[in-house]
Amino acid sequence: MDEFVTLPTVALVGNPNVGKSTVFNALTGLKQHTGNWTGKTVDSAVGTVSYRGDRFRLVDLPGTYSLSPASPEEEVTRDFLYHASPDAVVVVADATCLERNLALVLQVQAVTNSVILCINLLDEAQKKSISIDLEGLSKTLGIPVVGTSARDGCGLCDLMREVKTVCSLPNAKPSTKTQTDPADFTRHAEEIYKTCVTQSPSRRANLDRTVDRLLTSKYTGIPLMVLFLGVILWLTVVGANYPSALLSHLFTALEPKFAALLTALHLPQIVVDALSAGMFRTTGWVVAVMLPPMAIFFPLFTLLEDVGYLPRIAFNLDHCFHCARAHGKQALTMCMGFGCNACGVVGCRIIDSPRERMIAILTNVFVPCNGRFPTLITLITVFFAGSNALFSSFLLILLIVFAVLITFLVSYFLSNTVLRGMPSSFVLELPPYRRPQIGKVLVRSLLDRTLIILWRAITVAAPFGLILWIFANVRVGDTSILLHLANFLDPFGHLIGLSGVILVGFLLGFPANEIVLPIILMCYLAGSGLSEYESMSSLHTILVQNGWTFSTALCTILFSLCHFPCATTCLTIWKETKSIRWTLLSILLPTLVGITLCLTVSTLFRLFT
């Protein structure tokens, strides 16, 4: 550890989306997140790199546009450069938009004389017929300039050679240069760019502009965004059916073996039943239903991130969120919520304003996560669409659009009440379209998102499975605690178009939304554990026999859209806000909205039917 601290320190600085973290990963071998839009923290990543017998401490600082900070991320970068006195500062720039990046290079030069300019994405620049005079740029700036294509490892040895040289210089210390007006940096950057960069007409650049005209147009941008989301959801739902069934059969086969193992340990039968039919079955159900959709959705979502489409989504929805007095980046955290609301809450870190970040956290639950899709799709199929998969998908997309509208309305309500304020402005950069790195996409989406969220769900589902078994099997008189609770909630449930059993399903489905419908079936079938249905027709029969109507199904769908977050999301909200008050509000707010919607719909049905 002492040796690590005494190593020469090399800071990586750059605008967002220039491939800075890719350079860091390629040099250190660490698997850091390369996107700047979701799940990014303010903390800087640190690693070591060896070059020709010497070792260096490499620090990947948060992306920044200026050393005059406008966000916590930019403050971290500025403070590190001013106070940590790194031995070398590598400013990573995007070769396809060098003029904007040069302003930061000039600002860094004003505070330290140990700067190296790394012009990354040379391969992308070549495709756009952009030519950069590296030698001339080096002479003009008076610093080493190295061209790289970090994703392919090209130029990194040259970069480390310059790093070693700069770190060995006796005068590689903070400069005492006088600060300059930021506008002067911008003008100087433009002059340098004109002398060192030339661009010829390019089919690739024209193609990018044509694609952007489609994807960001006020006429086609949002319809195409909805279409892409619909395709992703369809692939997720259809693709998850088979692996979910396999996992379900696997856990069903393992349950008696697990029970036999517990019996062999001479545990009392009641303990064996509680652990196998309660904890093991619930956990297995959560894994079987939750893992396949996440394993499909998150790679597809990360693929859009890697290609460069996510910032376009923020661009399309920026005006809508601005009208709701919220932050445009909330569009990205909302999209993350479709995979998992807990991931969406973590993604809210990208919003700089504490007020707007809290609005995004509190409203993220209004978009349905993959845990709610099984219930939504099942009820749509059973009561509204039948076997017509296309119509079922259309109704699901309508529900999603409705959920997004609710997000806008609640965001507007919050920004005019408990979180009063005006929306802040932010720089929205549209990065160039890039060829996705499939391998890294899979690793990042599965390890950084899917498995982490799944583990949180398991840690919550296991103890709640035990509690659920106790509620279903411990009797007071001739009735289980589960049915006593359902009977107690029945008057209120019927008032809002549901029933006591349905409310119990949502309450005891708190550990994971995936088990809401199985709990409802367990109550109807008087089972001792979670129950499955043989077919859609048999499920329809069971529900209708227990008093379900079209009104009941619609109210259940609406309450599934708008109710308290699952336990994993609540835990994540508490960790992000460090506040019991805001966590309780995140539970109360969507529940009140859901009750209001159900009460309205059920009242209309009573009046007109």
Image (tube, rainbow, N blue to C red):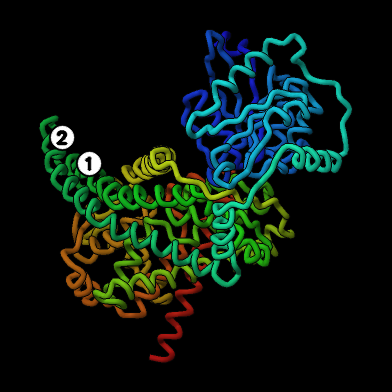
**Mark before the other along the chain sequence, 1 or 2:** 2
Q: Amino acid at mark 2?
A: Leu
Q: Residues within 10 Å of mark 1 (few under 14, many from 20)?
A: many
Residue 309 appears left or right of 271: right
Is the residue 473 above or below the residue 386 in the image?
above
Q: Residue furthest bottom?
A: 608
Q: Position of residue 387 (x, y in %)?
A: 24, 74
Q: Quadrant of the C terminus?
A: bottom left
Q: Secondary structure at mark 1?
A: helix
**Are the residues flagged by discs 1 and 2 in contact, CB closer than 8 Å?**
yes
Q: Position of residue 602 (x, y in %)?
A: 42, 80
Is the residue 601 above or below the residue 122 in the image?
below
Q: Quadrant of the N terminus?
A: top right
Q: Secondary structure at mark 2?
A: helix
Foreground pick, 459 / 30: 30
Is the residue 156 above or below the residue 411 in the image?
above
Residue identifier under label 2:
262
Q: Position of residue 597 (x, y in %)?
A: 48, 74
Residue 358 appears left or right of 436: right
Q: Position of residue 384 (x, y in %)?
A: 31, 78
Residue 28 appears left or right of 277: right
Residue identifier under label 1:
275
> Tag on residue 106?
none
Residue 583 appears left or right of 558: right
